[in-house]
Amino acid sequence: MGDSIISGLISKLNMLPDEAVTLILAMLPISELRGAIPFGIHNNMPLARLLAISILGNLLPVIPLYFLLGRIMRLLDKSRAGRGFSRWLVNRTLKKSGVIQLYEMAGLIIFVGIPLPMTGAWTGTVAAVLLKLRPKYYFIGITGGVLLAAAIVSALMLLIKIAI
């Protein structure tokens, strides 16, 4: 059942232009631009267009998430399954957010910008909300981190492409 759903989604994505797939990948919490940039480079998208779409796609969902997360968490807490998920999310995020707690905006740039598993703009947003970072620090930190991640991932992917 799950395989047929995934293969159905993949076949639908294959029908979209590369730019649309790149935007979708950049918006998703699992892939973010760390998945979008390799996809675009693999599909020979022009680098400037690829970076613009990936950065925009990565930033689009996390800005409203910053303002809505409190409400979302309160809604989740109304059910047992939701409460379990929200507690897991809070605990996991706070465990990984030491650099943000210590350095605030600069820590957020580092946390979001270094492309490691379970870091990125989505997790950085959750951490910023939980740590009550002021919006000014959040916006600069997330944007700086996304730009840093885009530079690192692009450089690595281009080096790999040259080496192959």
Image (spheres, grey):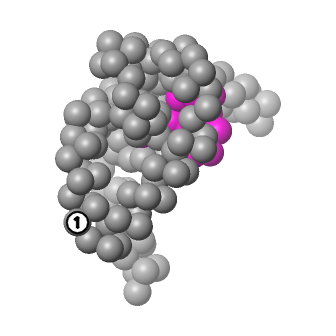
Compared across the picture, whether 74 is left or right of 92 comes to left
Give the quadrant of residue 27: top left
Quarter occupied by the C terminus: top right
The mark total stands at: 1
Disc 1 crowd, CA 10 A, few/some/many (<14, 14-19, 20+): few
Give the quadrant of residue 18: top left
Q: Position of residue 95 (x, y in %)?
A: 60, 44
Compared across the picture, whether 86 is left or right of 33 comes to left
Magenta region: 111-122
What residue is disc 1 on? 78
At 40% from the left edge and 86% from the top edge, which residue is drawn? 1
Magenta-colored stretch includes residue 147: no
At 48% from the left edge and 15% from the top edge, which residue is drawn? 105
Q: Nearer the viewer, residue 24 or 44?
A: 24
Above or below, 145 against 122 in this view is above
At 42% from the left edge and 47% from the top edge, which residue is drawn? 29
Q: Nearer the viewer, residue 23 or 99?
A: 99
The three-letter amino acid code for the residue at tag 1 is Lys
Residue 158 visible at all: no
